[in-house]
Image (tube, rainbow, N blue to C red):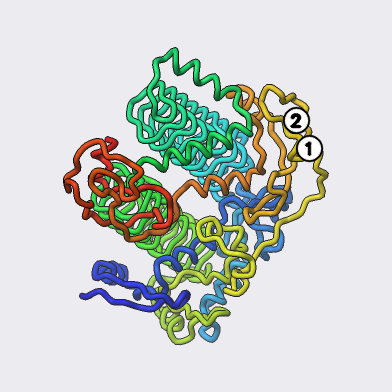
Amino acid sequence: MASETRTCQNCKQQFTIEPEDFQFYEKIKVPAPTWCPECRLIRRLTWRNERSLYRRNCDKCGKSIISVFPKDSGLIVYCKACWWQDDWDGMKFGVSFNPNLPFLIQLRELLNRVPVPALFGLEKTLENSEYTNMTSYLKNCYFVTHSDHSENCSYGSMMVDSKDSIDNLLLYESELCYETVNCRKSYQTFFSLDCESCHKVMFCKNCVGCSDCIGCVNLRNKKFHIFNQSYSKDEYEKLAKNFRPISSLMIEGIKSRAYAHWNKFPQKYIHEKHNSSVSGDYLYNSKNVHQTFMGVDTEDSKFCAFITPPRVTNCYDFTHYGNVADLLYETLQAGDHVSKILFSWFAVSNELNVEYSIFTVGCQNIFGSISIKKREYCILNKQYAKEEYEKIRREIIKQMSDMPYRDKRGNIYRYGEFFPLEMSPFGYNATTAQELFPISETEARENGYSWKNQERYEYKITMSKETIPDKAEEVSDSILNEIIECAHAGKCVEQCSIAFKITANELAFYKKMNLPLPRLCPNCRHYQRLKQRNPFKLWHRQCQCAGEKSENGIYQNTISHFHGAGKCPNEFETSYAPERKEIVYCEQCYNAEVV
């Protein structure tokens, strides 16, 4: 079968379906997609709310709770404890399929009637970690999302097996870290990117096995370096005093200097380790995985993102979760021994043959069902004998072709498409779609997406951004009573909360690490870290090694490369856009210089 070029229904751009893609669609018996990979990812992400949390009451027990669903979502919301109880049954909301009404409209009506969980995660695995989402096995954590097995952490996303850390993104097996992005097995690491097995480093990038370093890049197993210059221990300790006690003003100055310094050195075209035949970014221990971002222990998959090990295989257009999963397609948040989950959102724990379903647990052979547990042969929350189930399923698939749902833009949703963006219970700006593919409110509404205006709280700012103490030693415990003005003051597009408070755990951390108080609210800080993570998008580029030097003449190679004095011929797909300042090398040239 040859490759085929099609025009995306949504963005009208052309995209290519390769022979191996057709083979996958044939394997799971679904039609080829009508949307391009990027539009398909955005569509799934508009149903993923990780960090926009709201106060409301549980519709079952009545207690005040935190939820991803705001009061005006139109959904019935149970706290996690109530939703996971066995004293209610989603099957009582079951309805018969109506052949005269588009199926997706019937499914949306059912979603408005069946209780949904307030948050994602396992309630019984959290200890003193109420204000978290998409988490499990946390202790004493606050505003931590998409994280597992961590303790005493605050304001982080994608943190695993970490302790006593604040304001981090992509942190693994680390301790006492602050304002890092994509760091692993590190200790007391601050303001750093892409570091591994480092100890007491600040403002470093892509360093491995290093300690006592400041402002460095591309170092391996080094000590006592400042901006890649080596010093004796005594010299280093003397010069390092110039960076302590650190103040917020100093941070901005050192950051600016460090970023300029980092860009004088080549970067590998991809963040990866222990892979074979992959494309995308942030990929580890994977094989034959393409156009995938943040994938671990994944094989034979494509167009995936946010994958959790172990063993995810044969999946296309799968976003978030994993943990032993295969044959997943156009699905969001599914995992824990699941197989053949199609066009669904949140399907967990030993599930098989699930289609167009939402919030299901331990089910098999279900279609268009919501908030049911350990059921089989169900359609719209109504159970059937196997033969009747299969008959009605075929009728629905035919109806979805003959009477498809059409959105406000005219896009057609036949069998094989994920849920429509306009049906999402979240505003576009409250979802991960806004983080990865940011748009304005005007653009959102022009595209038919909903938009969630920030909830305004009646509080009075007691400390202006100009009067925040500049150093940790200047801060007293009275700061815990202050409502502090965010430096952005709501004038950004980063979900700014206008003001914020310092928690007792935070203050203890800042004092222990001799760090100044933040100037931005948690949301704005999160968006600053997102800017340091590469986008979920690829550009075709050529290695920028030009022989003796980099293409721009800034970096002088230390040894001769395989291509000699001529320009490197290697090409690749990379998440570094052509207009960025980084010097981007292929793996061969990069390894010659760094590893």
First in sequence, mark 2 or 1: give its number.
1
Tell me the kind of residue under disc 1.
Met
> Residue 151's image quarter?
top right
Along the line of sight, the residue nearer the viewer: 236 or 429 = 236
Viewport quadrant of the C terminus: top left
Residue depicted at x 76% and y 54%? 456
Residue 386, placed above or below residue 405: above
- Mark 2: which secondary structure? helix
Query: On the image, numbered disc 1 is attached to which residue?
Result: 463
Helix, strand or loop for disc 1:
loop
Relative image position of residue 49 (x, y in whole percent): 57, 56
Residue drawn 70% across the image and 44% down it: 486
Q: Residue at (60%, 31%) from the top-left corner?
A: 250
For residue 62, side relative to residue 256 (left or right): right
Pinpoint residue 337: horizontal percent, then vertical percent: 37, 51
Residue designated by label 2: 479
Amino acid, disc 2? Ile
| Marks 2 and 1 close (CB-CB < 8 Å) | yes
Front residue of 52/375: it is: 52
Mark 2, Cα crowd under 10 Å, few <14 / some 14-19 / many 20+, is some
Let me know if residue 296 appears in the view.
no
Question: Residue at 40% across / 49% down in the picture?
Answer: 294
Q: Can residue 100 be seen from the camera position used here?
A: yes
Q: Nearer the viewer, residue 488 or 67?
A: 488
Q: Is residue 391 above or below residue 198?
A: below
Q: Position of residue 416 (x, y in %)?
A: 41, 73
Looking at this rendering, what residue extends furthest in the front direction?
A: 553
Dividing the picture into quadrants, the one containing residue 205 is top left
Residue 268 location, x and y as percent? 32, 45
